[in-house]
Image: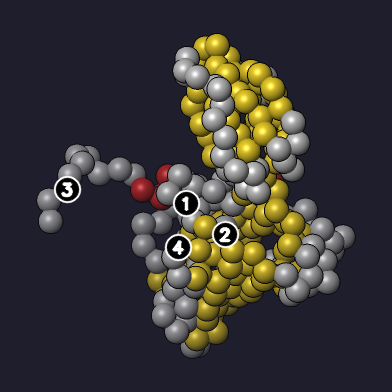
């Protein structure tokens, strides 16, 4: 196979050379691989050598039929993986999530107080307990969807693009994995907020609201502007007004 890019991009080896956080990787059943930070390859955990230490930037990977656990020994939090999954250890002192899930087939998570767990495609999961939060079950579904099931007595929260979703005890939530990513969108200080029909939109630049009520809002751009709502970003140009309405309201001519 001929490389389409020369030289090849550096890949994940430059993400981290290892931080201060250290966790324990435990093999429960094959296949399980670990990759130390800065390394370009991993190695398996065997039946007679089933534990290893991982610092920030290290990987824990399981294949089909594999079972493994990432464990924070001082606090008690853990991530149990089943099937094709991959997790990177984060550096909490650098305000990173405790771990990033790069891929997941099935996982059961207990989150330490104040920690966040990065989900595939970028959304952030955390709990509300004073100590450990969870367990939370995360599994891949058909249609490129993640399902989050809250099996704890507390509430789970997910920062998903421009919104925070709350999942109560016993509830489940399906999260689409978008090509644009689902990482939280940073709100700029010059953004203005418009509320209508129970929804919240953010305006930036030359966008302004012509009129709004509980069902609908009309937005006009006097110069290039940006609108963020329901996880979408809409570029506004010098055209006619944009009509925004709730899902229960019929579309209307903005004129």
The dot on residue 75 is none
Determine the CA span between mark 1 and mark 4: 8 Å
The dot on residue 3 is 3
Label 4 neighbour load within 10 Å: few <14, some 14-19, many 20+:
few
Under tag 4, what secondary structure? loop
Q: Do the residues labelled 3 and 1 touch (CB within 8 Å)?
A: no
Label 3 neighbour load within 10 Å: few <14, some 14-19, many 20+:
few
Which residue is depicted at the point 66% across and 21% down?
209
Q: Tell us which disc is closer to us: 4 or 3.
A: 4
Q: Do the residues labelled 4 and 3 touch (CB within 8 Å)?
A: no
Which residue is depicted at the point 54% across and 60% down?
101
Q: Are marks 2 and 3 in contact (CB under 8 Å)?
A: no
**Residue that protrudes farthest toward the top in the picture:** 222
Q: Earlier in the sequence, mark 1 or mark 4?
A: 4
> In this view of the protein, which residue sits in the foreground, 244 or 222?
244
Left of 60 or right of it: where is 117? right
Q: Where is residue 146 in the image (x, y as percent from the top left)?
A: 54, 64
Where, by quadrant of the figure, is residue 203 drawn? top right
Under tag 3, what secondary structure? loop
Q: Where is residue 103 in the image (x, y as percent from the top left)?
A: 47, 64
Q: Which of marks 4 and 2 is nearer the N terminus?
A: 4
Q: Which of marks 2 and 3 is nearer the N terminus?
A: 3
Left of 112 or right of it: where is 233? left
Label 2 neighbour load within 10 Å: few <14, some 14-19, many 20+:
some
Say above or below: 87 vs 44. Answer: above
Where, by quadrant of the figure, is residue 42 drawn? bottom left
Which residue is depicted at the point 49% across and 56% down?
177
Residue indicated by mark 1: 178
Residue indicated by mark 2: 175
Determine the CA span between mark 2 and mark 3: 35 Å
Which residue is depicted at the point 47% across and 14% down?
238
């Amino acid at each position: 196979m001929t490389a389409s890019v020369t030289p090849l991009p550096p890949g994940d080896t430059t993400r981290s050379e290892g931080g201060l956080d250290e966790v324990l990787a435990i093999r429960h059943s094959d296949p399980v691989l670990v990759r130390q930070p800065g390394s370009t390859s991993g190695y398996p955990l065997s039946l007679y050598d089933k534990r290893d230490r991982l610092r920030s930037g290290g990987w824990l990977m399981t294949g089909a039929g594999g079972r493994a656990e990432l464990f924070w020994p001082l606090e008690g939090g853990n991530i149990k993986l089943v099937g094709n999954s991959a997790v990177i250890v984060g550096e909490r002192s650098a305000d990173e999530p405790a771990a990033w899930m790069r891929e997941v087939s099935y996982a059961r998570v207990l989150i330490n107080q104040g920690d966040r767990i990065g989900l595939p495609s970028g959304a952030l999961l955390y709990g509300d307990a004073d100590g450990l939060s969870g367990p939370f079950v995360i599994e891949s579904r058909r249609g490129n969807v993640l399902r989050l099931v809250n099996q704890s007595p507390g509430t789970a929260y997910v920062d998903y693009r421009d919104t925070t979703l709350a999942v109560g005890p016993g509830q489940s939530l399906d999260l689409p994995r978008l090509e644009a990513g689902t990482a939280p969108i940073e709100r700029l200080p010059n953004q203005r907020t418009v509320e209508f029909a129970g929804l919240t939109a953010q305006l930036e630049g030359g966008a302004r609201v012509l009129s709004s009520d509980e069902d609908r809002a009309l937005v006009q751009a006097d110069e290039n502007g940006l609108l963020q709502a329901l996880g979408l970003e809409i570029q506004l140009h010098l055209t006619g007004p944009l009509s925004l309405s709730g899902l229960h309201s019929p579309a209307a001519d903005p004129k």
